[in-house]
Image (spheres, coloured by chain):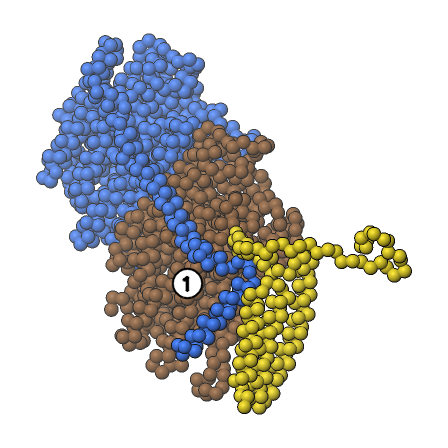
Chain colours: A blue, B yellow, C brown
Amino acid sequence: MLSVPSLLVCIPLLPLVGAIFCAVFGGVKELRRWAHLPAALCAALSFVCVAFVVAKLTEDGAPIEFPVQDSTSGQDVDIQWFSVGHGQTTVSVPFELSADAIAGIMLLGITFIGFWIVVFSIGYMHGSPGFARYFSVVSLFLASMTLMVLANNFILMFAGWEGVGLCSYLLVGYWHHKPSAADAARKAFLVTRLGDVGLILGIFLMWALADQHSFNYAWIFNHTRVKFEYYSEVYTAACLLILCGAVGKSAQIPLYVWLPDAMEGPTPVSALIHAATMVTAGVYLLARCAPLFVLVPGVQVTIAIIGAATALLAAFIALTQHDLKRVLAYSTVSQIGFMFLAVGCGGAAAPVMAVTAGLFHLFTHAFFKAVLFLSAGSVMHGMHDVIDMRQFSGLKRVMPITRWTFLAGALALAGVPVFAGFWSKDMILETVLEAGHSDRFGSIYMVLFGVAAVTALMTAFYTFRAYFRTFEGELKMPEGAHPHEPWVMSVPLIVLALGAVGIGFVHATPLTHWFGNFISKAPELMQANGGRHVEDHANWGLMFGSAAIALLGVGAAYYMYRVKPGAAEKAASAAGNVYYLSLNKVYVDEIYNLLFVQPLNLLAGICKLFEAVVYDLVRLIASIPRYMAEVIRPLQNGLVQFYALTMAIGVAVFVGMLLFFHW
Amino acid sequence: MISVSHYLAVGAILFCLGLIGFLSRRNLIVMFLSAELMLQGVAINFVAFSRHHGNLHGQVFTLFVIAVAACEAGIALALFLVLYRRKHSLDVSLWQGLREPGLPITGDPEPLPPEPEEPPLPHLAPAGAIPARGEPTHA
Amino acid sequence: MLTPDLIRLLLPALMGLPIVAALVLRFTSGTRSRGLALAFAIVHLALTALVVVSGLELIQDDPNLSLGIKRQEKKLERVFAPQFVPGDPMPDGRASYSTTNDILPIYGPNPSNPHERVKIAAAQFFIGLDGLNVWLVALGSFLMFPVVLISWDTVHEREGSYYAWLFLLQAGLLGVFLSFDILLFYVCFELTLVPLLFLIGGWGPGPNRREAARKLFLFTLAGGLITLLGVAGTVLYVYERTQIGGGHGELTFSIPRLADLVQTGMLQKSEASHGLWRDAQTYLFLALAVGFAVKIPLVPLHSWLPGAYSEAPIGVTVMLSALLAKMGTFGLLRICMPLCPDATLAVGMPLIGVLAVIAIIYGALCAYAQTDIRRLVAYSSVSHLGFCVLALMAFSPASIAGGLLHMVNHGLSTGAMFLLVGMLVRRYGTAQIADYSGMWSRLPVLTFFMMVACLASIGLPGLNNFVSEMLMLGGVLDARNVRIAVVPFTVLAALGIFLSAWYTLTMVRRVFFGPIKEPPTAQPVTDLTGRERLTIVPVVVLCLVLGLFVQPVLDVMYRDVGRLAQIGDEARARATK
C-alpha cells in the first residue's frame, strides 16, 4: 500500500527510472524508436502522484514529509546522503523530502506541463538522431526539477538545482554539431553556474549563521533569525548571494544573457525548461526563502528593482526581434522579471501576498508560455525549421489549430481580461501598489509600479506583433515548408491552450481564492508573514486600468501590422537609434564580452605567459651550476702530467700551510 | 756522525728528482722510472726511521713498497706495450682521451722536428740460406 | 570474511605482491608481460578488496579503542590507531597499535646501566590500516587495473620492464599510504621517484621526455631532501623534549608514538619551553611541508608538472595525477598535521592556505589558456588539489573528511579524464585542442564517458566531487576558523568551482561539440573497443557510486578524521589560552 509520503519519493524517482529506461532503449537498436514511451509513462505517473499529494495538501494543509519521523520509537529515521561531524557542528545532508503548498503548486505545473510537452516532443522530435537521448535527458530534467522542489534542505535543493542546469546544458546543446547550439549550451551553463557559486556560498554562510548544524529549511529560518541582530552584514551578504543564484537561474539582469541564446535547443525544450519550469526556479527559491528575505528590506527592494528593470529591458528588446522564438524568450525574461518584482514586494507589502502573486504568475505563465512556445514549435516544425517571422505570414489558413492555441497564449500573455495572465499580472500590480504605500522605499515601489505598467503595455504590443505577423495577413511560406499538425502535437497544444485560457480562475480575485488560500497554508510563508493580515479585495480601478493597457497594446499592434502595413517601418525609422538599440539587444552581449570575457581570456593568457616565465626562470636557476662548471672545466684536460702537477702543488700548499701557518 | 736527517735529505732529493722527472719528461718509460725514483725516496725514509726508532716497522713497509713496485712495473710495462702498439709512440701527450668533451688537445707549441726515418734493420738470412747479393736483405 | 589475524598476515602482501610482480615481469617480454601484468593487477585488486572489506568494520569501530576514550571528552589518549599491524606484540587479534618488526635497530647505552648497550630505537616495518589510508590504499590498488589496460596498446617496446617499473611504483605508493613508521614512509615516498624517472624518460611518447623526467626527479628530490631534514628534526626534537625534566628521552620513528608524544609534550611542559617548542614546530612544519608541496604540487613549486604530465606515457600520467599527487596531500595529513598541530594552525592557513588559494585560481586560469588537452587536465589537477590542501589546512572534521574524500574523488575523476584523453590521442596521435572538433558525432561513446568525467570533475551533484567539495566548503567555513578570516578564502575557492566549469566546458565545447574536424589518420577511426570500455567503465561507475552512496565511505574514515580534528581543536585551545 502506497502511503502519501512514499508517493513523495515516487515523484522524482519515476522520471529518473524513466530516464534510465530511455537510455537503455536508446542503446538497443530495435527499441530505439520506442524510447519516448518510458519518458511519457513516467511523467504521467509522476503527475498522478503529484495529484494525490496536492489533494492531500488541500485536505489538511500540513506539509507532507519523507521519511516519516517515527514518533513512537523516538528515533530519527533519516537516510543520509553524506554527513560529517558530531555534536553541534555537522555538515550533514539527509535525503529528506517535504511537500508544502509552494512545492505542491510547483509540482503541479512541472509534471502536468512536463507530461504534455513530452507528448508533444514525440511528434516534434520524430526521426531526429538522438531521439532516445532527448527523452532520457528530458526525463532526467523532470526528476531533478521535482527533486529540487521537494528537497527539504538547501544542499539537496542545490543538487536538483544543478541537475536541471545540467539537463538544460545537454538539451540546449542537443544539436551538438551546430556551433551556435554548442556555444549557447556552454554559455547557458557557465552563466548560471556563476550565479550558483553565489548561491552555494550564500547557503554556507546561512549554515554558518545557523549554528552550523543543519541545512534544513526550517532550522535555518529559525536560527538565522536569532543571529540577525548580531551579524546583520553577514546575513545581508548571504541573502544577496542567494539572490545571485536566483538571478542566474532565472535569467535576470545582469545574468539574463544566456536565455535568449538557449533557444538553440529543440523548441519543446525551450517550452519546458526555458519558459515553464527551470527558469522559474529562481522565483521558487526566493519564495522558499521568504522568511530570510523578509528581515532585509534593502535586499527585497533590490530584488524588485532587478525584476522591474529586467522586465522593462527584455520587453524593450522583444519589441523588434524578428525571430519568433527570441521574441518569446525575451518575453520569458520579462515575465520572470514581473515575478521577481512581485516577490521583491514582500516586507513592504505582506509577504504572503507578494509570494502568492509571484507564484501565481509563475503558475499561469508556465501554461501560457508553454503553449506559446509549443505553437511556435509547431510553426517551426511545419516551416522546415525556419523561425524568422519575415519569411512567413498568414499561417492561420494552413495551421488552424496552432493559430488558435497561439492566440490563446498570446491573449493570456498580453493580459487580456479573463485569460490566465490577466489575473496574475493584476495581482502583481496590486501587490506593487500596496508596497508603494509602505513607509520605507514606498516611492521606489511607486516608480516600479509605473515601470510595470509600461512593460505590460509593451508586452501586449510585442505579443500581438508576433501573432499578426505570423498568422494573419497573406499566406507566405519559406522553401520546403510542409505545414502539418499531427494529433500527437495538437492534443498537447489544445490541452495547454485550455489551461492558458482558464487556469487563471484558480485565483480570479473577486470570484475565487483557491490559489491564495492554498499557498498561504505553507508554514514558512506564515512564518515570514509574522501574522500580518492580508485582505484579498478586488481593486476594480486597477483591474480596468490593466485591461485597458492590455487592449491598448493589442490595438496598437493591430493598427501597425493589420490596418496600416507600412506603419511599422515608419515607426522604426522614426525611432532611429532606439530601434537599432532594441534590435541589437542593447549590445549587452558585446559589452559583457568586452568587460568580462575578454579580460578573463587576457588574464588566462597572462597566466600562461607567466607560466612560461617561471619555466624559464627554473631553467635559468638550473643553468647556474653549468656555468660555474664551465669555469673549471678546462682543468680536466686529460693530461696525466697536468694532474700530477696539480697534485704536487696541492701537497705543497698543504704542507706549506702546516709548516708556515701552524694550522 | 750521519744522523737520520742525512738519510732524510737523500730521500727528499731522490723524491724531488723523481717528481721533476715525472713532470717534465714525456716518455712513458722515463716517467715510470721517475715514479719509481720517488718510491725509492720514500723507501729510504722508511728505512731511516726504522733504524732511528729501532724497530722493524719501516723495514716491513719498505719490503712492501718494493714488492708493490715490482708488481706495478710488470703491469705498467705491459700497459705501455699495449699503448705503443696502438700509436707506435711512447709520448704521453698522445693520450688525452679523458679530457672534457670540447676541449682542444694540449700539444707542443713548438713540436720537435720529425725524427728522420731510420733505415730498416738488416735481416739476417735464415740459417742455411745464401744471402742474395746486391739486394736489400729484408724479405 | 577474513579474521583480523589473517588480515594482519595479508597486509604485507599488499606491498609485497607488486614487488614480486615487478621482479617476475622484469624477466618477461613482448605481449606476454601485459597479460601477466593484468593478472597481477586483478589478483592485487582482489586481495585488497578482501582485506579492505573485511577490515572495514574494525576500522570504523574498534571496540578496544572506544573503551579508552569518549568522543565528548576533551582529551585524546591516542592519535592514530592503526589496525591489523603485522608484528603486533599483543596476541589473539587484540591490538597494541605498535609492532615488533624492526628493520634497523639503534643501540645505545642503557640509561640505568651505562656500560650495557641496549636497543633504544628502531626503524620498523610498521604498516597498518586506519580510516585515513584505507580508501587511498583501495584506490591505489583499483587504479592499477585501468592503468595496465590503457597501457595495453600504447606501450610497444620493452613491455616487461615497463610493467615492472609500474608495479614498483605501485609498491612505493602503497608503502607511503600504509606505513606508520616515519622512516619507512620517507623511504617509500622517495622510492616512487626512481620508477617514475625511468617510466617517463624511457617510455614517454614525446621528444622532451628526458627533460621532463629529469625535472620531475630533481624537483621532487630537492623537496624530498628538505622533508628528510624535517623528519630527522622532528624525531630528534621529540627525543630532546622527552628528556626535559629528567626523562630518559624517547627516540622513536613510529608516527603514532611521535604524535602522542607531541600531544603530551605540548600539554605538560612549562610555558617557556612551550614557546620554544612552538617555534621549533614552525620550522619543522615548513621543512616537512616542502617535499609534500612539491609532490602535490602547490603553485610556486609546480613547474615540473605540465611537462611530466604531458610527456609521460598515458598510464603513468594516470598514476601521477590520480595517486602520486595524493602522496603529498596525504603526507600533510599523516605527518605535518599531527606532528606540528600548532604550526599547522599558525602558519599552515596563512601560508600554505594562501598558496592553495593561489593554486586554485592560477591553475584554473592556466588550464583555460592551454592548447593541449593533457596539459589542460594537468593544470586542472593543480587547481583541484589546491582546494584539497586548503581544506586540510582548515583542520576541522568536515574539511579533513572532505579533503580526504576529495583525494579519492579527484583520483577517480582526473584518472578517468586522462584515460579518455589517452584513448583519444591513441586514435589521432595529437592532443592539441585545435586539431579536434565535433568528436561527439564521430566517437559518441567516448564523448559520453568524457562528459561524465568532466561533469564529475566540475562537481555536479550525483557525481563524486560534489560531495567532497561541499564538505570542504563547509569545513573551511567552520566557525573554528573564523579567527583566520577564512571567508575570502572560501569566496575565492568557490570562484575556483566556477572557473573549473569554465575551462572544462570550453574544452568540451571545442573538442566534442561543433562540426566534425579530425586530424588525418591512416585508417578510419572507430569508437571505443571492448577493452577500452572495460578500462573506463569501472572508473566512471565508481564516480557515480561515490557521488550517491558515499556515507559508508565517510563513516569508515570518520573515527580517525575526528581524532585528527580533535588535535586541531586542542591546538586551537592552546593558541587562545
Q: Position of residue C120 (x, y in %)?
A: 47, 78
Above/below status of A365 relative to C380: above
**Looking at the image, which is closer to me, B134 or A315?**
B134
Q: Which residue sits at x=18%, y=50%?
A: A232
What amino acid type is highlighted by mark number 1? Ile
Please tell me whether mark 1 sits on a helix, a strand or a loop: helix
Above/below status of A112 relative to A606: above
Whether residue A558 is visible, yes or no, is no
Can you identify the residue that label 1 sits on?
C226
Q: Which residue sits at x=39%, y=13%?
A: A478
Q: Quadrant of the N terminus of chain C?
A: bottom right
Q: Position of residue A448 (x, y in %)?
A: 16, 31
Q: Position of residue A99 (x, y in %)?
A: 32, 43
**Looking at the image, which is closer to me, C228 or C344?**
C228
**Looking at the image, which is closer to me, A551 or C115?**
C115
Whether residue A626 is visible, yes or no, is yes
